[in-house]
Image (tube, rainbow, N blue to C red):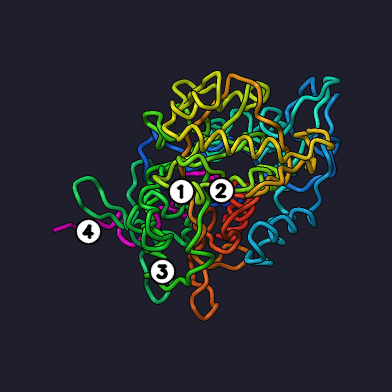
Amino acid sequence: MSSTVNEAGNEHVADVIVVGGGNAAFTAAHAAAVRGRKVLLLEKAPQELFGGNSYYTAGATRIAHNGIDDLRDFIEYDDRHAVSEVPPYSAAEYAADLVKVTEGRNDPELTEVLVNEAAPGLRWLQGLGLKYRLMYERQAYEREDGSYLFWGGLHVGNVGGGEGLMADHVAVAEKLGTEVRYGQDVFDLILEGGAVKGVKVRAEDGSVQELRAESVVLGAGGFESNPEMRRKHLGEGWENAKIRGTAFNNGDMITAGLAAGAAKGGDWGTCHSVQWDAFTAKNESNRELTNRLTRQSYPLGIIVNNRGERFLDEGEDFRNYTYAKYGKVILQQPDSIAYQIFDATLRPMLRTEEYDMPGISVESADTVEELAAKIGVDPAALAKTITDYNESIDTSKPFDPNVKDGRAANTVPRKSNWGHPLVTGPYYAYGVTCGITFTFGGLKSDTHGRVLDEAGEHLPGLYVCGEMLGGLFSANYPGGSGLAAGVVFGRRAGTLA
């Protein structure tokens, strides 16, 4: 039987307790600390596995801006800036993108705050010590004249990707005097008189410690690492998805928040999921390869299932607007496996950090039929699919991956942009499956991160941010808006807590 020990009786161990250890949680901690609050951050993972899901990202963060001159004040200098075109991306475009990809199911009030405060939030964090840059390797192709054109509204990211992002956050927390404890299995909230007064932490020996504070900020992620919850809320088969990020986001604090009276927020039936290396060993929660296990150059080629059939529009939009929904489509294919197919002409255009990954799942062959045999697909079926695709391409339009070029392949299913005949050997097939990133359902809050109950009233003492905050995303999301939301609503929660 577990014993219960109160640290310092009923005295507060801090003014603010933050539960979680990713971008949103640390941002909330910084916002509270700069106000002079005593902050205790509790991270479930051991120190060597710090950083939550944020560690596993590329660090891309979507903000509204007025072009490259508007970004120079907080991004790291790069010689390529002089030959780079970075189109302005307005708050109105940002909001419209959210409406488009979520099919209008995004919360409009949360959206308004996000699109207007993401850029100021990054500047604030940069002033504290975080470092940002233009993401050349992910968001721009070099043109024939040596210049660069950025696309898709997502242009800025952290120096060092997710690993650099979280190392910077930890350094800022230390500078601000925030106490960070690792290996903290926070599993419940202390509720007294209808208000949250702290958290319960389970030690390795099963004993329970109660830690009290004036406010608790929950930034402990979704339930994507919990197979039972995935199957219950996302549906049959989702228990088989690969976990892209941290293995510690098991939904315990979402469950605790609901038990304390919080209302559910957002879409509990969908999630962020991507095309993920299918066969490489250690293709879950891999801290060495992190985001390199994604396969995001798919708009250039075609994707087939193990029957040799195409089943989606690879060129529907820039990858920023489709990649987070196509993992689900892969999961629904036979054996939850598909293959991205490219030829020798396209191969040099693939993202180096992903497609030159050590140990990558890839097969190559001089002919389509030989390639099919290597991946266990009927050669005649794959050859027919590629022939139909090649012959249907509108070659009257130039191929240009920097813009939506309208170079369609008018076959079934249609490919709307970037149709490029696959005719030059060797041919390449990259095996992909579904990698789950985070779940979209969470706790309901107002625009300041104050958790709401079923009656729409604030639950005193409780705040939420990051992937635990439900309401912004449904079915899909614009790339980079997750880290942006963590900054915006983490900062807002920490400013009030």
Q: Amino acid at mark 4?
A: Thr
The mark nearer the N terminus, 4 or 1, is 4
Question: Of 6 and 470, which appears nearest the observer?
Answer: 470
Image quarter (top left, top right, bottom left or bottom right) of the C terminus:
bottom right
Q: Residue furthest left?
A: 1
Alpha carbon separation for disc pair 4 and 3: 23 Å
Q: Residue at x 37, y 46 (%)?
A: 248
Q: Earlier in the sequence, mark 4 or mark 3?
A: 4
Residue 333's disc number: 1
Q: Residue sitting at 74 percent across and 28 percent down?
A: 141
Q: Is residue 131 left or right of residue 293?
A: right
Give the residue type at disc 3. Answer: Leu
- The residue beneath circle 2 is 311
Q: Is residue 475 magenta?
A: no
Give the Cα separation between the discs numbered 3 and 1.
34 Å
Q: CA distance from mark 4 to mark 2?
A: 55 Å
Q: Which residues are magenta?
A: 1-28
Q: Residue under label 3, please give it.
A: 258
Q: Nearer the viewer, residue 153 or 354?
A: 354
Single out the mark in the foreground, 3 or 2.
2
Q: Residue at x 80, y 40 (%)?
A: 405
Question: Is 458 on the left-hand or right-hand side of 8?
Answer: right
Circle 2 crowding by C-alpha within 10 Å: few under 14, some 14–19, many from 20: some
Q: Which mark is residue 4?
A: 4
Between disc 4 and disc 2, the foreground one is 2
The first of marks 1 and 2 along the sequence is 2
Position of residue 297 in the picture relative to residue 117 (left or right): left
Q: Is residue 11 magenta?
A: yes
